Image (spheres, rainbow, N blue to C red):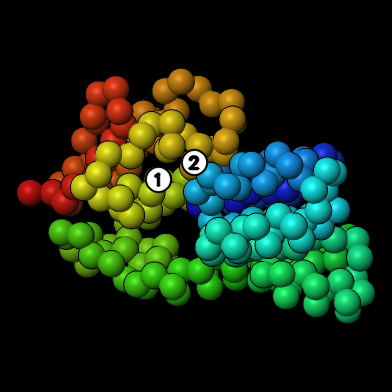
Amino acid sequence: MRIVIAEDNESLSGAITHVLKRAGYAVDQLFDGIEASEHLAGADADLLILDMNLPRRQGLEIMRDLRSRGQGMPVLILTARGGVADRVAGLDAGADDYMTKPFPMDELLARVRALLRRRTRIMPTVERLGAMEFDRGTGTLNLEGTPIDLAPRERALFELLFERAGTVVAKTHIADSLYGLGAEVETNAVELAVSRLRRKLGKAASIRTIRGLGYLLEPGT
């Protein structure tokens, strides 16, 4: 899953990014309000962690724009202001949760998990494709009734391809989703991730390479 962090404190943003990447999430870091607005206008993200006091554009404005465009990604607000009026303003603007700085990183991670679980309830909890059965709520994949152990990045790749089964997913989109926008990754990192997932799926599914375009997931034969 892909998380956007809009936080101008580079030290704090780096610490959050480190924790989230260790948990298997892809992360996009933004440090400026206008930059965040432009990025979010076209972002395909699962969660936004938003500082209220960004340079050039405030978090409340960014969040109102997000909701006015109909983007329903969960938003977790971070702010140094913990007054009731501030919390009410943030929640009324469309935020889903609120944390006052400073905060423990393990609590942040728990809130991220809770918001992402809540988002999966909007979609069908369990979906099937051929011999594959994927439970979004638990992240569990079963092949003909047998559970398959997926590492966090393998699970993220599978979910990305599974959601778009039958259509080509661009290699660049996969890289951004797995590692974060603009992350420095080895040129063959996506190929290696796909290869590992192929081995685990076996004959239950086919991940076809569409040369020059990307990858396509289909049920096995």
Task: Indicate the quadrant where residue 92 lies.
Answer: bottom right
Percent across and percent down for residue 152 are 48, 50
Residue most extreme to the left: 221
Badge 2 element: helix
Q: Which residue is mark 1?
A: 157
Where residue 178 is drawn, which disc sits there?
Answer: 2
Q: Residue at x 38, y 31 (%)?
A: 171
Q: CA distance from mark 2 to mark 1?
A: 7 Å
Give yes or no for contact between labels 2 and 1 (Cβ–Cβ under 8 Å): yes
Task: Indicate the quadrant where residue 167 lies.
Answer: top left
Total residue callouts: 2
State whether residue 152 appears in this view: yes
Percent across and percent down for residue 155 are 41, 51
Quick one: label 2 or label 1, which is nearer the N terminus? 1
| Observer-nearest of 57 and 26 | 57
Q: Is residue 172 above or below residue 123?
A: above
> Label 1: how many residues lie within 10 Å, few (<14), some (14-19) or many (20+)?
many
Badge 1 element: helix
